[in-house]
Amino acid sequence: MTALLAIAACATAFAQAAPGGAPRFVVVLDAAHGGDDPGARLGSQAEKAYTLALSVRLRSLLTARGFSVVTTRESDATVDPDHRAEIANHANAQACLSLHAAESGSGVHLFISSLAPVAGTHFVPWKTAQARWIPRSLSLAGMLNSALSHANMAVTLGRTTMPAIDSMSCPAVAVEVAPERLSDGQGSASFDDPEYQTRVAEALAAALVQWRSEERGERQP
């Protein structure tokens, strides 16, 4: 319990408020893995290090654009799926991106929960809270797809079971970054390529700016 409270305090400390009294638009960045869960091996680094670096880079881009950003971790800490969902739900987020990486495939893979959608009037248990938000999560994934495609990145979309996202009561998408295949077919961009990292982060930020402009004024489910 003490460890969970410490993580929650850390996450709260890194929530960035919108400047100038503007209405808060909260985005949760969930850097997957961490602590005793290294994730996949990505060449010379573990997935947990890559996702944390991407979260930090994206947080900087979003706060500069007036978003309130909440992160599930800011260090190499173990955070279980339930607590990741608790952080997002407590933040009353308008969007959550769960950040992952993989050496398989190419470009960026977008996943939403495989839960079947339910109407907003039905009671939804904690483990399936995302079911009420499937339509909004699909819309968010579509916006991310458009921005990444505009940045000339290959994008694939899918649905899968994700314990953390399945318990989130907000639009939520898992973003899995894979190596970028070079246009000449000779090899791929490395995970350590700063230009590739920047393009991914900037495309995600651009999508969230567009999401904010369209989400404001829309009613929640």
Image: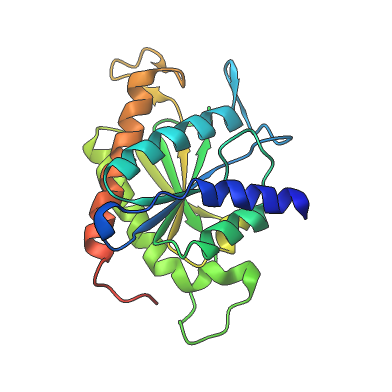
Q: Which residue appears farthest toward the top when viewing the image?
A: 186
Q: Quick check: can you spot residue 62?
A: yes
Residue 41 point in image, percent of width and height: 62, 25
Residue 50 point in image, percent of width and height: 52, 28
Could you tell me which residue is drawn at 44 percent across and 61 percent down?
93
Q: Nearer the viewer, residue 31 or 165?
A: 31
Name above or below for residue 78 compared with residue 184: below
Name above or below for residue 4 compared with residue 57: below
Could you tell me which residue is drawn at 25 percent across and 66 percent down?
216
Task: Choose top left, top right, bottom left or bottom right for residue 133.
Answer: bottom left
Q: Which residue appears farthest toward the bottom when viewing the image?
A: 121
Left/right placement of residue 99 relative to residue 95 reads right
Residue 157 point in image, percent of width and height: 41, 48
Left/right placement of residue 40 relative to residue 17 reads right
Residue 164 point in image, percent of width and height: 60, 56
Task: Choose top left, top right, bottom left or bottom right for residue 138.
Answer: bottom left
Left/right placement of residue 77 relative to residue 57 reads right
Could you tell me which residue is drawn at 34 percent across and 61 percent down?
24
Name above or below for residue 190 compared with residue 165: above
Could you tell me which residue is drawn at 42 percent across and 62 percent down?
171
Left/right placement of residue 153 relative to residue 31 reads left
Q: Quick check: can you spot residue 116?
A: no
The N terminus is located in which quarter?
Answer: bottom right
Q: Nearer the viewer, residue 140 or 186?
A: 140
Task: Choose top left, top right, bottom left or bottom right for residue 148.
Answer: top left
